[in-house]
Image (tube, helix red, strand yellow):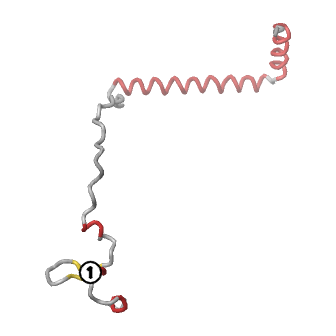
């Protein structure tokens, strides 16, 4: 596969001649503004890092591998968290719906 350098240069010249000078200047200005913005942000962050306003990235600490033990079982108190509470007994303990001696139809009218 051969390249014809003369044809490529002619094509590039034709494309550049086809673009109006105003569009070319606008495109060049956009590229220069983008580079200026990038350099400005880089310099600001560099100075902030030098002056201590930015924290340098912390090194990852070696953490021990997690235990293979299963998580502890939930206590009875946590298991009953969403159960229906009927009231408080004589000893101060909560009375849950499943512990009540009342029939279901009586619980609805409380």
Name the quadrant of the C terminus.
bottom left
In the figure, 23 relative to 1: above or below?
A: below
Name the quadrant of the N terminus.
top right
**Observer-nearest of 60 and 50:** 60
**Observer-nearest of 60 and 49:** 60
Q: Is residue 27 left or right of residue 78?
A: right
Q: Residue at x 83, y 18 (%)?
A: 17
Mark 1 lies on residue: 99
Q: Return the x and y of residue 39 as percentages of the image width and height.
A: 52, 23
- Please tell me whether mark 1 sits on a helix, a strand or a loop: helix
Q: Residue at x 26, y 81 (%)?
A: 99
Q: Return the x and y of residue 62 as percentages of the image width and height.
A: 29, 31
In the figure, 6 relative to 30: above or below?
A: above
**Observer-nearest of 101 and 35:** 101
Query: Furthest residue to the front?
Result: 69
Crowd tier of the residue under label 1, counting other residues whose Cα lies within 10 Å: few below 14, some 14–19, many 20 or above: few
User: How many numbered markers are drawn?
Assistant: 1
- Quarter-of-image position of residue 13: top right
- Quarter-of-image position of residue 83: bottom left
Q: Return the x and y of residue 5 as percentages of the image width and height.
A: 81, 7
Q: Is residue 23 left or right of residue 110?
A: right
Q: Residue at x 28, y 83 (%)?
A: 86
- Quarter-of-image position of residue 18: top right
Q: Residue at x 78, y 22 (%)?
A: 21
């Amino acid at each position: 596969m051969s390249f014809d350098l003369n044809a490529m240069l002619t094509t590039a010249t034709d494309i550049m001649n086809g673009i109006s000078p105003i569009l070319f200047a606008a495109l060049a200005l956009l590229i220069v503004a983008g580079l200026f913005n990038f350099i400005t942000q880089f310099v600001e962050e560099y100075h902030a890092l030098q002056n201590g306003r930015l924290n340098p990235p912390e090194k990852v600490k070696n953490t021990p591998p997690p235990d293979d033990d299963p998580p502890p079982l939930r206590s009875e108190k946590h298991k009953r968290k969403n159960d229906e509470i009927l009231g408080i007994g004589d000893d101060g303990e909560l009375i849950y719906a499943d512990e009540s001696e009342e029939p279901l139809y009586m619980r609805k009218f409380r």
